[in-house]
Image (tube, grey):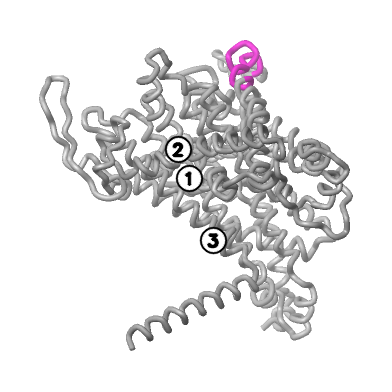
Amino acid sequence: MNAKARSRGLDPGLLVKVFGGVFFAYLFFGFMLLPCLNTLTSIFSTTNAAGERDPLAVIRFFFAGNMRSFVWNSLKLAIGLVVTVNIVGVSIVLLTDYFDIKGAKILRLGYMTTLIYSGVALVTGYLFLYDSDGILTTALVNAFPGADPNWFSGFRAVWFTMTFACTSNHALFLRNAIRGIDYNTVEAARNMGARPFKVLWKVVFPTLVPTMFSLTVMTFITGLCAMSAPTLLGYDSINPEIVRLAGSSVADEAFPQARAALLSVILAMFTIVLLTVLSSYERKGHYLSVSKTKAKLQKQKIDNPVANVLAHIYAYVLFIIYMIPVVMIVIFSFQTYGAIRMKKLDVSNWTLVNFFGSQDYEYLTNRGTYKTRKGSISGLFANEATLNGIRLSFILSAIAAALACVIVVAACSYIFKHRDKKSGVVLEYALLFPWLLPTILICYSYRTYFNSESIWYVGDLNLYYAENVRMLIVIAYTVVKLPFSLRMIKAAFYAIDEELEDAARNLGASSAVTFFKVKLPIILPSVLAVFALNFNALFTEYDMSATFASSYGTSYAMVIQSMCAEEGLYGYNVNASGRRCASTVFIMLVSGLILYLVYGVGARDLGERLEIRDRRRKRIEKLKAKFSRQSS
């Protein structure tokens, strides 16, 4: 077959290369470059009241109006988070992995709860506690009548929430850096008479500078591009304003689309500058010379009794701050509607209605009569709107996570095969392009560019119209996850031994057979891990969902956000707080299971898996022997 194709001038390998090149060009120019260029040009194509084009109208409006305040608010939040997130993030890592603190394993579990619930779910959890009618705020006002019940709003609330929500990267990356420190250098400094905190400052911290610099840049970008916390807590920052302007019209205010585009481009400029600085810093190669035989780091005891007590108090105060939202949400998810509404724990009455089933709701009208709505108090899996949001997010996230993995696996195969050619380098940088832009810019560009029936390369379909918006969400999800997928899966390709490929070719296997029979089984665990992590992130994603807000594209995160609205008024939106608690518990279970499969089961090597299987077999044999003796 192949010989006949070649004799006719049709080389299957060439056809695959041509098709792949056309597809990636279509993906890059059609869904990365052109929509973003359209956003950039829209800033300078606005018209005045007379219909005349005025390229600088938006720029003048920016300096004369209140748009600068949104930029300043985002910058203030980003700068504040760089300070507090680094302080808390470094603290939780040092307290659990460097210093000898009692109960460090339990503390670590509390500090890492932000890995299993984040974004809109985490913010709604904090609202449940600290809002004007929240559990802790209500208790505080009852104890101190002069306290302000509306303290948890605006900048303070966003800063507080994101300080503890954004330490996940420290818990993962900084912990690995701490555990990689050579204990010989620490022990040598201690033998020379250096005190523990001097060793920490002079020996340990210099090795963490590259990691800390990366985490600082990531934290700054996170604060700059914050969406869910400012939206739910009432803080005027860039991203919520972009989403608001995207849904506005010229009849409502002056050139809203161009203003949204300008704010998106400002975010992109900040992101590009920060990533450029980070890349330049990393290229300088900050390394520390260590001994050839590294010793495992041993936890350091705090000799000063006062400092030791203060460190333990600080550690457990942080633990309480992290754990209170989780514990309270889990407990109240099993409480009745009345207990949740009044924010009073009723230990004598537990229920599953927040998860399953429904109850009737009776309320008093403004005329003084009682009315009953049948089945209005509905649970998470009995409420149609919530269930539809879960179903839609599950399907769209799974499709996008799978597409990102398939595209990146094909791209990595080509990149490694042509690693010495410019085409491989160009392809890699094209897939990393979305990292240069804020997510909100990509999504806003899609919303405005594809909200038209004149885009020929998508079949002249309006992708923002009706059910087509779901296709647009999948495309946005996929494009945004391409850089992360590339970095993770590309690392897995380095584990492939080239001798295996050579052996397969010598046995007459084609490139396709070699890939599916040799390469794919080696990288498959990493690909599945990336799929799981992508799905985990997209399932409760809020920023993109808010940009594509539509009755046909209401994701699970949008449903959770709507649960923060007034509930129970005239029998509508009843038990929203209960479903919100149940939703957070459900998200924690899903995220925890995925993280366990990725970092627990998936992180074990073959030897560990065989050892676990052997222990399980021996345990089963002991149980069988025990039962056989009892029966005899």
Q: Predominant secondary structure in magenta?
A: helix
Mark 3 Cα-neighbour bin, 10 Å: few <14, some 14–19, many ≥20:
some
Residue labelled with disc 1: 540
Q: Reply yes or no: does residue 69 show up in magenta.
A: yes
Residue found farthest to the top: 64
**In this orientation, which residue lies closer to the viewer: 114 or 201?**
201
27 left or right of 402 in image: right
Tag 3: residue type?
Leu
- Tags 3 and 1 in contact by the CB under 8 Å rule? no
Tag 2: residue type?
Pro
Q: CA distance from mark 3 to mark 1?
A: 18 Å
Tag 1: residue type?
Thr
Residue labelled with disc 3: 597
- In this rendering, is residue 491 above or below 360? below
| Residue at horizontal 43 percent and vertical 31 percent from the top | 127
Earlier residue among tags 2 and 1: 2
- In this rendering, is residue 234 above or below 603? above
Residue labelled with disc 2: 325
Mark number, residue 347: none
First to last magenta residue range:
59-72
Q: Position of residue 432 (x, y in %)?
A: 70, 48
395 left or right of 1 in image: left
Quadrant of res 96: top right
